[in-house]
Amino acid sequence: MKETFEDLPGWTFEIREVSANAYKATGSDGAGHSFEFVGYNEEAVVEEAKRRARKILEGGRGLI
């Protein structure tokens, strides 16, 4: 299921459970930026996805 967040206009996120307690996050925007990663706490994965999108918006400094 795709999600958007009001504080990150233009970004679309998908967080899905790919294995027991393993969540894959995918984020993309209309400008062609994207990322994906896997984490083991759904709530933390959502927050990390939002953090990565914000960093990309800021120019990518200190992204990972």
Image (tube, rainbow, N blue to C red):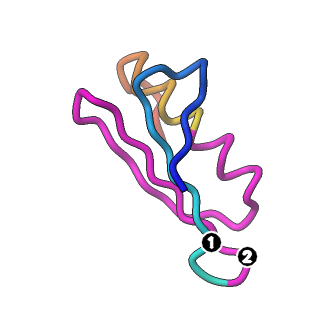
- At 23% across and 27% down in the image, what residue appears? 31
- At 51% across and 49% down in the image, what residue appears? 2
Q: How many C-alpha atoms fall within 10 Å of the one at disc 1: few (<14), some, or many (≥20)?
A: some
**Relative to the observer, which residue lies in front, 6 or 60?**
6
Image height check: is 7 above or below 35? above
Magenta-tinted stretch: 20-49
**Spatial CA span between label 2 and label 1:** 7 Å
User: Looking at the picture, which amino acid does disc 1 mark?
Assistant: Glu
User: Looking at the picture, which amino acid does disc 2 mark?
Assistant: Asn
Picture quadrant of residue 39: bottom right
Q: Is residue 62 magenta?
A: no
| Quadrant where the image shows the N terminus | bottom right
* Element class at badge 1: strand
- At 73% across and 76% down in the image, what residue appears? 21
- Outermost residue to the bottom: 20
Which numbered circle lies on residue 21?
2
Residue indicated by mark 1: 17
Which numbered circle lies on residue 27?
none
Q: Is residue 11 left or right of residue 17?
A: left
In this view, the mark in front (2 or 1): 1
Image height check: is 49 above or below 26? above
Q: How many C-alpha atoms fall within 10 Å of the one at disc 2: few (<14), some, or many (≥20)?
A: few
The picture places residue 27, in percent across and down from the top left corner, at 43, 44
The picture places residue 10, in percent across and down from the top left corner, at 40, 24
The picture places residue 38, in percent across and down from the top left corner, at 55, 64
* Element class at badge 2: loop
Q: Is residue 13 left or right of residue 21?
A: left
Report the number of numbered marks. Answer: 2
- Outermost residue to the left: 32
Q: Are marks 2 and 1 in contact (CB under 8 Å)?
A: yes
- Outermost residue to the front: 1
